[in-house]
Image (cartoon, helix red, strand yellow):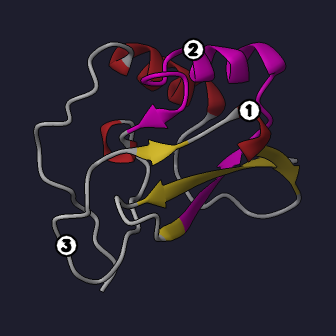
């Protein structure tokens, strides 16, 4: 079993773009809670800072920003192949390292063309 993590990009006009990665292995409830505790305001993170892809819309506008949304319900056990070369323990470490240090000063990246 692997874990699909779904996360949402929502621009200032409320247009949404869904993102996901499939991680090899299964996250424990404690690991998921730890990740959620690392999010800005309990729900926001910057995927590129932990090695996740960022898919937005084709053109960067004044409505765009760097924050994506994540919650406990976004972790789902699946029988799909992994799409990212990170394991649960490493992902948790990366979130812990970013906690309280999310850098929102860099322009949005990872634009879907």
Assess whether mark 2 and mark 3 are in contact (beta carbons under 8 angstroms).
no
Q: Is residue 59 above or below residue 23?
A: below
Where does label 2 land, which residue? 37
**Horizontal side of residue 22 vs 66, given as left or right:** right
- Alpha carbon separation for disc pair 3 and 1: 29 Å
Residue 49 screen position, x and y as percent: 31, 37
**How many numbered tags mark residues here?**
3
Point out the stretch of residues depicted in magenta: 18-45
Q: Is residue 79 magenta?
A: no
Residue 72 - label = 1
> Tag 1 or tag 2, which sits nearer the N-term?
2
- What is the C-alpha distance between the residues marked 2 and 1? 10 Å
Q: What residue lies at 81% left-to-right and 22% top-to-bottom?
A: 28
What x and y, as percent, mark residue 43? Answer: 54, 31
Q: Is residue 53 above or below residue 27?
A: below
- Considering only order in the chain, which callout, 1 or 3, is on the residue closer to the N terminus? 3
Q: Secondary structure at mark 3?
A: loop
On screen, residue 17 above or below 107: below
Identify the residue position indicated by label 3 in the image: 60
């Amino acid at each position: 079993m692997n874990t699909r993590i779904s996360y949402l990009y929502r621009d200032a006009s409320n247009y949404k773009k869904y993102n996901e990665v499939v991680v090899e292995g299964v996250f424990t409830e404690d690991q998921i809670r730890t990740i959620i505790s690392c999010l800005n305001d309990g729900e926001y993170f910057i995927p590129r800072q932990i090695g996740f892809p960022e898919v937005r819309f084709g053109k960067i506008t004044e409505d765009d920003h760097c924050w994506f949304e994540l919650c406990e319900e976004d972790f789902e056990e699946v029988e799909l192949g992994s799409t990212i070369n990170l394991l649960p323990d490493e992902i948790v470490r990366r979130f812990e390292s970013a906690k309280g240090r999310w850098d929102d000063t860099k322009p949005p990246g990872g634009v879907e063309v």
